[in-house]
Image: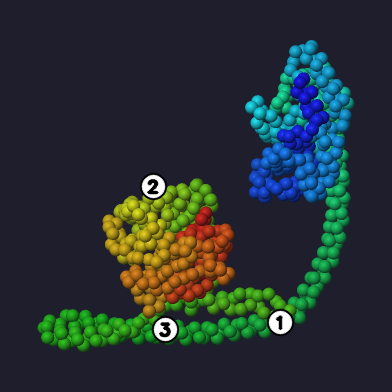
Amino acid sequence: MTDINEAKTSGTGKLNMDGIQDLTLRELSQELSYEWEALASFLGMKVAETSVLKMDFPGQTENQVFNMLIRWRQKQEPTVDQVAVLSAALIKAKRTDLAVKLQGPRSSNITSQPQGAVGQNVEHTSHSTSDEKSTGSKPLPDQHSLLPGRSHESSNGQQEVSGLSEKGTDKLTANTVNTEHREAAENRRPKEAYCSCSKHKGETVKFMCITCQEVICSQCADKEHCKPRHHCLSCETASEKYRLLLANKIPVLDEQVKEIKNFLKEASQVRTDFENKFFKTVKEVQERAASVIAEVKAEENRLIEEAKKLEQNRSKTFHDQEKRATVLLGTRQHALETASDVAKVGPHPEFLSQYLMVSNVIDMVNGQHCPKGDPRLSYLSFTASAVDGVGISLGRLELGGRWVMRREFGSKGSGPGEFQLAKGIAARQAGEIEVADYINKRVVVLSTEGEVLRTIPTQGVPRDIAALRTHLAVVDDANHVQLYGRYNFMTASVVGKKRCDFRSVAVKTDGTVVVGDVNRSILTEHFRNDGAPKRTVSLKIKPYFIAVDVGTHSPAAQRERVVVSSGFQKEVHVVDSCSEAVLAVIKPQIDGQPVYQCTGVCCDSGGIFVAVSGDERDQGHVHQYDADGAFRACIAQGLHSPQGITFTADGHQLAVADTYSVKIFHKV
């Protein structure tokens, strides 16, 4: 019984230089609730430390508070008056009542017990001594034993912290769910049953195990609830402690009952007010609708007339294009027939004289370019608008197409149809797309509807992919570029040098494979059949994503161009792959600010498309630019973190690899 006596007398002298004892901190943690985070701030704890405690003990406020106090105590110097510091923080946190308790007679002895505990402890000691003499059992745990989650002295003198009793938590949950059944059973239970031990017949309960949250007899305490893992109190001491805790909770429950009653009263009033306003609103709507029918009809006629005028203008444009193309077709057919006849002339002098004549005609015809098809001429839609307080506006006619998301598929994971990081994306043939699944080391072939068709495993991590008709190129983290044919059999391979860092790949219309090397800021071109090097193109930025374009956007751009996206350099360059000249520089912005990074790029007759990301997640955009790098439109927003982008094989849809999913956009 030496440890019991030492626990009883440890607080009779001066302040223990080890600081406030665990039992006192546990009692404080039982009293504190939502205000503990403010207390932690006043004690100098960082927000990150409190966040870690919340994650370590989710939903367990008492353990969060207790471990916060333990960590605070461990940081204190031996000479610090911990009681004074903690009391001041409690007052700042508006818990003066706890500060008074900590500073008062109970707290002057840091390890003091609840009132009356000394007498009860003596009785407990006497009883335990007699039991020891008669049974030879070990001493019972006293009221200074540790509570669950409380620090205690181990054999080597270091502090150890035990976790919450899951058993107690499970019991609390079960009691909450079965409250009504439990209360009915308790009412039918004889009072004598509360005093009898359910495990040892004839024994009465005399203690409460705080660790297990159950009342026990002396035999239970000796056999199943021993120190140091269990902390036991006499029934009298435990009753006094928990009666006080319960008394503190009753006013809170009373306030909650009042709050709910007030809510029901207010909700009833709100419902009555709503019903009255509902009927009033319906009447006002009917009256307003009746008064504006004539104005709506006039607005309808105006919009229809505007559409008819547009139809007349577009019809004239279509007619002029067809007429010009028909004339060009006639002259070219005549030149073709003449050239064919001249090619059959036998004598050399006669051939040469006729060749000079027909050659001039052909050169003249070649100078007359065929008009370019403009899909924008088909754009026409209607956007509705709300009725304002001044006049009636049904909406407006939209003369340009609008990109909308048609389909989204995929999620985070490693199973079929899941991606760990959808990096690159390509489209070999109609109705299919290929996605480089970065972490899962595979290329997934899907339909444009999201159905997984097949999977191509890769030896390394696939960084990017590109496709042209039946050919597929995959670049991995080992600086290898694997070339696959129609049936996904590897036909050739490109192996980078030691100083290379291949990150991107594209395929030209003639089958030439273009690889982006970010370490040397160059493009390397390779033959498709064997992967042999062809030539290099120097760049001014790092090619993290690339796309090739034949330059069909304007007559001034009839050249082979490469569009290069530089990642965190936040620029996109349009480069003449022959002269290495920079034709355009694009610096994308979101809300007037430079983007966080530029990622995937692709091109079509509508211009250059660039995927960009903002500073935060879910701020990804896809922007459209013309051939000279001028901004046209933002065609997609709210993307998670877009990577590669490409057009489907038919050119009608835009596919975006958005980290864990694929999004398909089309124009309406």
SS state under label 2: loop
User: Callout 3, which amino acid?
Assistant: Gln
581, above or below 419, in the image? below
Q: Residue at x 40, y 57 (%)?
A: 503
Residues at marks 3 and 2, CA–CA distance in whole angstroms: 53 Å
Asked if the residue under mark 2 is in contact with the one under mark 1, i.e. CB atoms within 8 Å, the reply is: no
Q: Which mark is residue 459?
A: 2
SS state under label 3: helix
> Who is closer to the viewer here, 307 or 241?
241
SS state under label 1: loop
Q: Please report whichever mark, 1 or 3, sits nearer to the chain's N-terminal start.
A: 3
Q: Residue 53 at x, y = what percent? A: 67, 43
Q: Residue at x 75, y 47 (%)?
A: 39
Residues at marks 1 and 2, CA–CA distance in whole angstroms: 66 Å
Asked if the residue under mark 2 is in contact with the one under mark 3, i.e. CB atoms within 8 Å, the reply is: no
In the image, 118: left or right of 563? right
Q: Residue 339 at x, y = what percent? A: 22, 82
Q: Residue 135 at x, y = what percent? A: 77, 12
Q: Which residue is mark 1?
A: 391
188, above or below 512, in the image? above
Q: Which residue is mark 3?
A: 321
667, above or below 241, in the image? below
Q: Please report whichever mark, 1 or 2, sits nearer to the chain's N-terminal start.
A: 1
Residues at marks 1 and 3, CA–CA distance in whole angstroms: 41 Å
User: Callout 1, which amino acid?
Assistant: Gly
Residue 175 visible within the image: no
Closer to the eye: label 3 or 2: 2
Q: Residue at x 58, y 79 (%)?
A: 397
10 Å crowding of disc 2: few (<14), some (14-19), many (20+) = few
Looking at the rendering, which quadrant does residue 332 occupy? Answer: bottom left
10 Å crowding of disc 1: few (<14), some (14-19), many (20+) = few
Residue 272 visible within the image: yes
